[in-house]
Image (spheres, grey):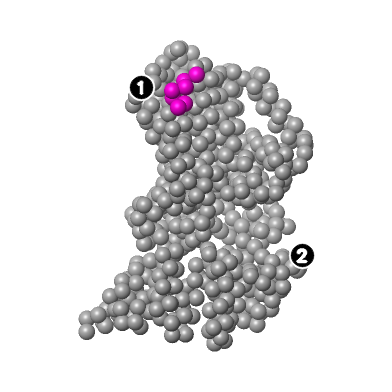
Amino acid sequence: MARNRLSVDQTDKKHSWPVWLFLILALTAAIFPYLTTLTFGFVYDDRLAIEENAHLRVWPGLGRIFLSDLWSLSNLSTPSNYYRPMFLLAYAGVFYVAGNTPGAFHFLNVLFHAAVTSMVFLLTLRFWRKQSMALFAALLFALHPVHVEPVAWIAALSELAYSFFVLAAVFFYSEDPPGRLPSFAALSSYAMALLWKESAIAFVPIAILYDILVIKQMRWKRWLGIGTVTLAYFAVRAQAVGGLAPTVLYPDLAFSTQVFTAVTNVGFYISKLLAPIHLSAFYELEFVHGITLTVAAVVVLVLFSIWGLRGRQAWAAGWILVSLFPVLLVSRIAMPLADRDLYLPSVGFVWLVAAGIDRLGRRSSIALLTVLLVTYGALTLQRLPVWRDDLPLLESELRQNPDSQSLRLRLASELGRRGKYDDALFQLDQILKRNPNSMDALVNKAGILGSVQDWSGVRSACAQVFGKDPNSPRCLLTVGYADEHEGHLSDAHARFARAFHYDPSLSQALVQQGVMEARMGNLAVAARTLESAVARNPTAPALNNLGSIYANRGEIQKAVQAFQTAVRVDPSFEPARQNLERALADATR
């Protein structure tokens, strides 16, 4: 077997250019269209993970990062089954360097996209040994419109990073002859990919298929090394999040339905690779219960690939399918359809397309490639502005799907967050016109009415909710605010306690419970409650309330520390700043 080298074959040499020149061209295509994202803001989950995440301001420690799930160290403060410590560590690093600046986080995404594009170029050059094909594949990857979501959305950083390390693992794994250092680098890259995102487990079948289809060897010893890393990862993951696999979200879903739906989703993903139009951040999942035209088409396509493709082409086709597998577990995935899921699978796709283009004559290949790149570039530039901010994103999605209740709820929440309460109520009323008993709309409406202190409206909306769910956590929290405003401290305390009991992710309910205990004179109990709240989610208001309790108990040094932390978490939170000045004055007396 010929050694893998970064070289060109005889048919390519007469038109050869320096490899670095082609690589620079590919990197330019990867970076230039996305420079505009450096002016974009935080979108959707970015706010919970970064902008409102107090854990970025109060260092939780490496131990907690590597032994916690993804969302417990965010403003959401709710347990999940996502284990991505490198994702959390990267955010902490960027925040330490640049603070709460969206452009810095976007810059990291663009850098990773460029790095992944360079790996696509190098791997294509290694496997096909043609500079022209390496350039074709890298350019197609750099500009493919389905990559707008993972590159433009900060929260999709894990998608970019795990893909880079999987490609690095493949690069080192395919070294010939295999030495100890490349083998170690391959396993280390795979381990790093797993710590970025669970989907990196796709490297296992990718490596095995490479051995079987490309070099036609059964390298059992190397597979044993990969298996060892995988088992070690599962052990650490189980320790951190209490499980090996994502949580089952649809326990009553029949196995046949899961299979048919997964096959249909494969068809959906392939269609987006072939025709990247009508892209969306919020696709609606439909469960499929039997054989449909899409199911039949996917099965035929897979069988044709098995029958008609050999060697590297067969591996590229298999790459698409096996790297999609982690998101095909439809009973366990919260969002089984998303553009970002195609980031790693698209590597196999661009290899197949580039190989097809390369078979054409020189003029035909350049003409077809030009058409594809211009089309991809135009679609990418058209899609990018949608990700500038939450409002254009949600408004764009709602125009595509005006009947979507979930999109209208998201838009109402964003409008409410911005203080546009009338607009938010209008969106919620639109939902309630079609579905007067929509629990989500009623709960959200109660929250908006609470923001404008329409307490009678809050009680009216939540009365409808309590009629169906007397333990609705968010309505208990909102009505608790109404009780507090009206001076019914005991009732407010009881509601806040019930809200937190039924939804431990509502850390604000725990904070308010502690505030009520303090106002009723139970300072020792209040201190313990707020200490627990701060441990869960160290927000500036929670720390400020805790500091006030310490000050009232005469624990001035602890009060100063709490106020200082509150100011560090949110320098614009004036109550904490004022309390800190008073506490420091008291400490010097």
Q: Is the magenta stretch mostly helix, strand or loop?
A: helix
The residue segment tinted magenta is 218-224
Disc ID at residue 179:
1
Q: Which of marks 2 and 1 is nearer the N terminus?
A: 1
Q: Does the magenta stretch include residue 219?
A: yes
Furthest residue to the left? 589
Please name the amino acid that badge 1 sits on: Gly
Image point (47%, 57%), residue name: 72
Is label 2 in contact with label 1 (beta carbons under 8 Å)? no
Residue 348 picture location, percent across and down: 55, 30
State the quadrant of the C terminus: bottom left
Residue 161 picture location, percent across and down: 45, 41
Residue 536 in sight from this viewpoint: yes
* Left or right, residue 564 beside residue 421: left
Above or below residue 342? Residue 348 is above
Determine whether the residue tagged by mark 1 lies in a helix, strand or loop: loop
**Picture quarter containing residue 311?**
top right
- According to the picture, the residue beneath numbered tag 2 turns out to be 434
* Left or right, residue 313 beside residue 549: right
Please name the amino acid that badge 2 sits on: Arg
Number of marks: 2
